Image (spheres, rainbow, N blue to C red):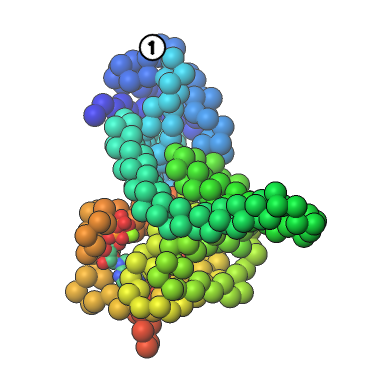
């Protein structure tokens, strides 16, 4: 892992940068001296830092930034930044920058392999769910071929069946794609509905009903593919935890911390002795589990300033609570 140190004056101009920057980003030290920090990084990162920077002296802050090198290739960096003062009271900023591209790539690869494994695990349920509408489509086509004169009614049903298949396959394709990283205002209810569409076949195979109760239609600033992944991982666990037919309830409501979404199952609950292990990489009690689901869930929520709480239900099962900040 390589890195470099930078010193800025109070106007944000570079007054010192170590030579290692040449190797990491391809720029010459002489080209960078005098340059302003925010001209070197993407503008969205620059405005994030401006909004969150604490100028109190000696307070260390970490910012992860994608810095383009001289060939416009993005390098993931971790920057430890602090404000210092000299004996005359002049302010400077100092940062230690580390190249964390390898770490990021490994993380992305792990998320990608988990996503593919989820897609694979859902395939059986989905194939089953698609076979039913296909059978009915075939039946109606045969009736029409035989000359039955109820075209209008049949066409209507056929379009409905095709739409069902379209929805579910597009959800499957969506989760098979690499995750994006682009935050926008997204509707919580829509994201939960999409995830339920995708997982309902799996639930139906086990006679589990998914009930959505009063889902808040609050908008949250988030990356849609990532937050959907969070709900997929939790809902999939809830289905897997239940051996008997029953019900999974999803509800969400505003709270002073943001908006909470509870996914309440009727499984065996989580034994006291393993609760602290949930979210550790590769911790699983399942034969075909990768043990990455909750770790990725926590990682994604952290990136969004959110949280995951795991609660034991009074009577039966557990509740996984997703907390997302509302801007
Ligand atoms: N709703 C739940 N009820 C009971 N136990 C749960 C529940 N959710 C998770 N767990 C426990 O937490 C463990 C870790 O979950 P996690 O989602 O991280 O991995 P996994 O489900 O085992 O594997 P994968 O998600 O990769 O298929 C599970 O193996 C299970 O023991
Ligand atoms: Mg899981």
Residue located at (52% from left, 30% from top)? 42
Residue 37, image x, y percentages: 49, 28
Instruction: Say whether residue 274 is visible.
Output: yes
Q: Quadrant of residue 103?
A: top left
In the rendered structure, the answer to whether residue 295 lies left or right of residue 130 reads left
Secondary structure beneath dot 1 equals loop
In the rendered structure, the answer to whether residue 29 lies left or right of residue 148 reads left
Residue located at (53% from left, 48% from top)? 169
**Foreground residue, 34 or 273?**
273
**Foreground residue, 63 or 179?**
179
Q: Quadrant of the N terminus?
A: top left
The residue furthest left is 273
Is disc 1's CB within 8 Å of ligand 1? Answer: no
Q: Quadrant of the C terminus?
A: bottom right
Quadrant in which ligand 1 is drawn: bottom left
- Whether residue 247 is situated above or below residue 111 in the rendered picture: below
10 Å crowding of disc 1: few (<14), some (14-19), many (20+): some
Residue 227, image x, y percentages: 49, 54
**Foreground residue, 294 or 205?**
205
Residue located at (79% from left, 58% from top)? 150
Residue located at (37% from left, 41% from top)? 112
The residue furthest front is 146
Residue 33, image x, y percentages: 43, 17
In the rendered structure, the answer to whether residue 226 lies left or right of residue 189 reads left
- Whether residue 48 is situated above or below residue 100 in the rendered picture: below
Query: Which residue is under mark 1?
Result: 28
Residue 199, image x, y percentages: 47, 60
**Foreground residue, 135 or 272?**
135
Q: Quadrant of residue 271?
A: bottom left
Instruction: Say whether residue 156 is visible.
Output: no
In the rendered structure, the answer to whether residue 192 lies left or right of residue 265 reads right
């Amino acid at each position: 892992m390589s890195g470099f140190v930078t010193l800025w004056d109070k106007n944000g101009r570079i007054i010192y940068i170590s030579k290692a920057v040449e190797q990491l980003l391809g720029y010459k030290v002489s080209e960078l001296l005098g340059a302003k920090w925010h001209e070197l990084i993407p503008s969205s990162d620059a405005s994030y830092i401006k909004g969150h920077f604490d100028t109190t002296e000696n307070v260390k802050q970490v910012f992860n930034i994608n810095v383009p090198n001289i060939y416009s290739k993005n390098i993931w960096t971790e920057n430890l930044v602090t404000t210092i003062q000299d004996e005359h009271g002049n302010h400077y900023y100092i940062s230690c920058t580390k190249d964390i591209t390898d770490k990021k790539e490994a993380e992305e690869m792990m998320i990608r392999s988990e996503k593919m494994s989820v897609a694979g695990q859902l395939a059986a349920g989905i194939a089953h769910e698609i076979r039913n509408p296909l059978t009915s489509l075939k039946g109606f086509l045969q009736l029409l071929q035989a000359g039955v004169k109820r075209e209008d009614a049949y066409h209507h049903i056929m379009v409905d069946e095709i739409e069902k298949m379209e929805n579910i396959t597009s959800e499957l394709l969506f989760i098979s794609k690499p995750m994006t990283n682009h935050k926008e205002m997204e509707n919580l209810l829509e994201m939960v509905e999409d995830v339920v569409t995708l997982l309902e076949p799996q639930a139906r195979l086990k006679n589990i009903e998914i009930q959505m109760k009063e889902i808040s239609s609050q908008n949250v600033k988030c990356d849609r593919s990532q937050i959907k992944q969070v709900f997929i991982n939790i809902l999939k666990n809830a289905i897997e935890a239940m051996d008997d037919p029953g019900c999974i309830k999803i509800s969400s409501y505003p709270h002073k911390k943001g908006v909470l979404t509870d996914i309440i199952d009727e499984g065996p609950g989580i034994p006291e002795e393993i609760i602290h292990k949930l979210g550790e990489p590769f911790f699983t009690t399942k034969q075909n589990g990768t043990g990455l689901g909750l770790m990725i869930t926590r990682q994604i929520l952290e990136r969004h300033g959110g949280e995951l709480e795991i609660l034991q239900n009074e009577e039966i099962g557990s509740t996984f609570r997703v907390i997302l900040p509302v801007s």
